[in-house]
Amino acid sequence: MDRRPIGVFDSGLGGLTAVRSLRSILPGENLVYFGDTARVPYGGRSPETILKYARQDVRFLRTFDLKAILIACGTVTSTSLEQLRRENDLPMLGVVEPSCRAALAATRNRRVGIIATQASVRSGAYERTLRALAPEVTVLQQACPLFVPLAEEGRTRPGDIVIETVAREYLAPLRGQGIDTLILGCTHYPLLKEVIAGVMGPEVALIDSGEESARELQRLLSASGGLGEPRGGGAIFCVSDRVEDFRHLASRFLGEDVGDSVRRVSVEDA
Amino acid sequence: MDRRPIGVFDSGLGGLTAVRSLRSILPGENLVYFGDTARVPYGGRSPETILKYARQDVRFLRTFDLKAILIACGTVTSTSLEQLRRENDLPMLGVVEPSCRAALAATRNRRVGIIATQASVRSGAYERTLRALAPEVTVLQQACPLFVPLAEEGRTRPGDIVIETVAREYLAPLRGQGIDTLILGCTHYPLLKEVIAGVMGPEVALIDSGEESARELQRLLSASGGLGEPRGGGAIFCVSDRVEDFRHLASRFLGEDVGDSVRRVSVEDA
């Protein structure tokens, strides 16, 4: 048994969708979450900028004695996972491979769509991973740059004409292409699941990348004997900007009150 | 005559609306523009984070030998102008006071509205400045957090249902309150001028904070004998992230091709 905490990070609130899954699948694990709210969003930035920010995020998380890190961010995983793995001597999991495996298990017609940030789409990481696992699969990608700001502003409700219009626009090229599976390749997107499902229709399976990576982490810890207690785990939330703003939305996204467990930290000098 | 360049900065593209005005009012001045595109947007961040970023922006600009700095950003002006002035021994101009003066010159019924970022509204800087200049004026404020991401994504056209809906929502509390003057308290907002004018109607005067601060700078340089050549000024554009993304949108916003005059720089270590 390994009682050390698991580190989880994202550019902002999105990674909380992975935390929610982790809390439900592994309720005994202790978690340290970092959301880089002073520099959110990452998805429109260059690979070099994202790697720089991600290195600082990891360096901060490693001030805790962690047993693993979950990169709960599609943008960081797509652009920086390999480099971060080379630089760190602890298990590090991203969201790309678990969701690609889940998509291939779900698709029947071998036509898979991916929606993600601009940086993730440009990196080609999802497409490369899918093709490496199943060369015959047809892959369609679409960047959705406004999804993160809209989700961070809480515009996630079906019927909201703003998010509905933006979603219909972004998803139009994927509809009619006959995909039966769609990877939500950014951990913010599960917040928009209902809206996206409404546009894509019930015949398209949606793959939640945060949830799939939480399951993968469970398998990994289980296989290596690294699981913690079966229940009673705690969580610390750290952010790089206003605690109040995070607390308000986080409780909504997490489905539990984060209360006094939120701290503000500086990671730029880390 | 003073041929040294004027420094101008903003979190991203918004300050280009002030640059556009400067190029038209003072076509002979040399300009150095910095847009902090690696950390845009500033408007939802805390005062401490904004001050930290602004100090780095100023430190970078001052690697040039400047005669003045125009803070072409409502958020930085609202939260950090006084502190930056104390720390720097060159004329430093913001966008708040010039636009408040212009609004007071324009209003007939003494009811003035302000739209700005969350951070600017929280700071109360516009309201304080208006009241100091004209205590009898009624001031109404409204934060518009999605305007910057939407403008940076180029969603500025009248008829676009997304920007139209968001604008109508944000502006609803100001309509019907009988204001006859509205300060666009963020330099991104002039990009949305047509949309905002369409919602507010022709009887409401819109004050462009970038334009007003460009005029104020002209007066200041003129009064101190600090004007440059009457024509033929050049401009250098510096950004903290991808040059390509900036070049594309900047040319549209500026109304002139920025071509090869864009450089990528790092300011975090400045």
Image: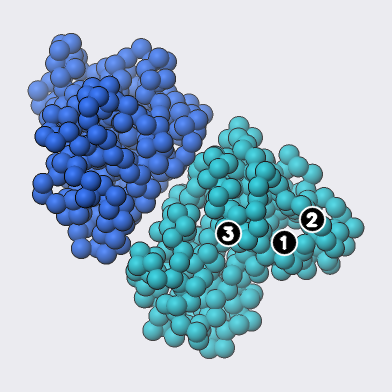
Chain colours: A blue, B cyan
| Front-lying residue, A81 or B51 | A81
| Front-lying residue, A145 or B104 | A145
Under mark 3, the amino acid is: Phe
Between discs 1 and 3, the one toward the N terminus: 1
* A31 versus A89 height, above or below: below
Q: Residues within 10 Å of mark 2 (few under 14, many from 20)?
A: some
Under mark 2, the amino acid is: Gly
Residue drawn where x is 51% and y is 71% of the image: B193
* B73 versus A204 height, above or below: below
Under mark 1, the amino acid is: Arg
Residue B22 occupies quadrant: bottom right
A76 sits to left or right of B69:
left
Between discs 2 and 1, the one toward the N terminus: 1
- Disc 2 versus disc 1: distance between alpha carbons? 8 Å
* B18 versus A29 height, above or below: below
Q: Residues within 10 Å of mark 3 (few under 14, many from 20)?
A: many
Q: Which residue is mark 2?
A: B233
Q: Hey, which residue is sitting farthest right in the picture?
A: B1
Residue drawn where x is 83% and y is 66% of the image: B222
Question: Subunit of mark 2?
Answer: B
Between discs 2 and 3, the one toward the N terminus: 2
Question: Could you tell me residue A168's position as x and y percent?
Answer: 27, 56
